[in-house]
Amino acid sequence: MVERILSRSDDLYARACAVSPGGVHSPVRAFRSVGGTPRFMTSGHGAMLSDVDGRQYLDFCMAFGPLILGHGNAAVREAVIGALDRGWSLGTAEPYSLELAEFITHRIPWVQSIRFVNSGTEAVMSALRVARAATGRSRILKFEGCYHGHADSMLLRAGSGLADAPVPDSAGIGIDAAQGTLIAPLDDEAALERIFATHGAELAAVIIEPLPANNGLLPQRPEFLQALAEQARRAGALLIFDEVISGFRIGFQGYAGYCGIAPDLVTYGKIIGGGFPVGAYGGRRELMELVAPVGPVYQAGTLSANPVAMCAGLAALQQLADGQLYRQLETLGGTLQKALSGIDGVTVQRHGSIFWLVLGTAAHTIRSPSAVPAEAGKRYAGIYHSLLDQGIYLAPSAFEVGFLSAAHDAGSITALTSALRQSLLPR
Ligand SMILES: *Cc1c(COP(=O)(O)O)cnc(C)c1O
């Protein structure tokens, strides 16, 4: 084995591990599932990342989704500088969140009222609280393979016994959180029917990523989402679409707009803040007016609707509203899918600018975690470092999706394709 020269990333990583768990502030940034040392990045411009050792990477992770306009978008930068000049935290009513709220509610009919928070996790937590208050019920149904942030009641997966009895996906989850959540498999109408027949009357809400993109990309059949909406309606449970990743990503109206199903409540994050920390939940006015100070549901935030983040978010959404970029990204996504699918042993699942590289062959579209080829994870770790050494930055996990942005072009696809071919050559 060749002795590796200690890089600055290695050095910083050792220091970071001494002062923070795993040297990172969100686990997937560590390289646990691909091995090795995470690269410490110093800057991002367009589609490129630069690390502390002066290496450049073509970025297909794009901060895990927020950067649909690429790194350093000029209009977002301008808006942020303007906000800084006016004061970056006011703690009062202000016009900046109003502008963003109007921009969204005027364009998404099922979002009549919206509340800004600081992360997708917070948005989900708050939407669930509203659903419980609205229905007077306490249980929530979620789906195996969907991620909804790290609130206790959402950090659960299906147990091995009863299909709907959950087990914690993390240490430190109280039993009441676990008992309040039921888990259903994706892509399975029969299971839905069973669960609703038994538990329908106890459910405050069903929450789903309508385009699940946190366990690979697992597109759901429209009929399945329709069946879910119908079951929820009949049971008197609210339908919550978690569009933290799909919102403003696959179209301005997210997946709800794409599939023509209006949820009762929707959660946003990632793109909505233009790369700054923002989350939001919204929906029908009478539901949102259950939230304080109008209604009895308490939810607050010292830094909520931070002016810098609000102005960044508005500047980002203004560039998306006419739909032009989505058409451009669909074309680019098609090019990527065609190029990568032409490689032996590689499967690509894609919707618009979200793609999932599966190192394995699948006869059918993968729609649930159980359908993922067994070898996919192992093979990913094997090629990851080869891609990195060739200047390609993908998320350091086989189960994270990739993102295209306004800063990518046909040349980016060519570079990714030839690097992937190279990394798959027998050594
Ligand atoms: C990223 C994500 C979250 C969590 O958002 P954070 O801002 O990381 O708290 C929740 N739901 C979905 C669908 C996500 O993709």
Image (tube, grey):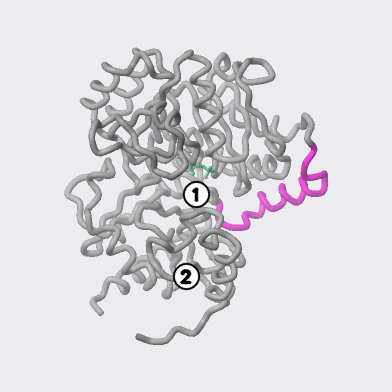
Residue 12 falls inside the magenta stretch: no
Residue 256 in sight here: no
Where disc 2 sits, the SS reads loop
Residue 93 in sight here: yes
Q: The N terminus lies in which quarter of the figure?
A: bottom left
Location of residue 407 in the rendering, given as x and y in whole percent from the top left corner? 53, 58
- The earlier-in-sequence mark between 2 and 1 is 2
Relative depth, front residue between 73 and 401: 401
Horizontal side of 11 relative to 332 (left or right) equals: right
Location of residue 67 in the rendering, given as x and y in whole percent from the top left corner? 54, 51
Location of residue 384 in the rendering, given as x and y in whole percent from the top left corner? 37, 67
Q: With respect to residue 112, does 386 lie above or below?
A: below
The residue positioned 62% from the left and 57% from the top of the image is: 72
Does the beta carbon at disc 2 come under 8 Å from ligand 1? no
Horizontal side of 86 relative to 369 (left or right) equals: right
Does the beta carbon at disc 1 come under 8 Å from ligand 1? yes
Please give the residue where the numbered disc 1 appears in the rendered image: 65
State how far apart marks 2 and 1 are (Cα).
Answer: 22 Å
Q: With respect to residue 353, does 197 lie above or below?
A: above
What stretch of residues is rendered in magenta? 69-90
Q: With respect to residue 223, does 305 lie above or below?
A: below
Where disc 1 sits, the SS reads loop
The residue positioned 53% from the left and 36% from the top of the image is: 268
Horizontal side of 241 relative to 188 (left or right) equals: right
Please give the residue where the numbered disc 2 appears in the rendered image: 37
Q: Amino acid at mark 1?
A: Gly
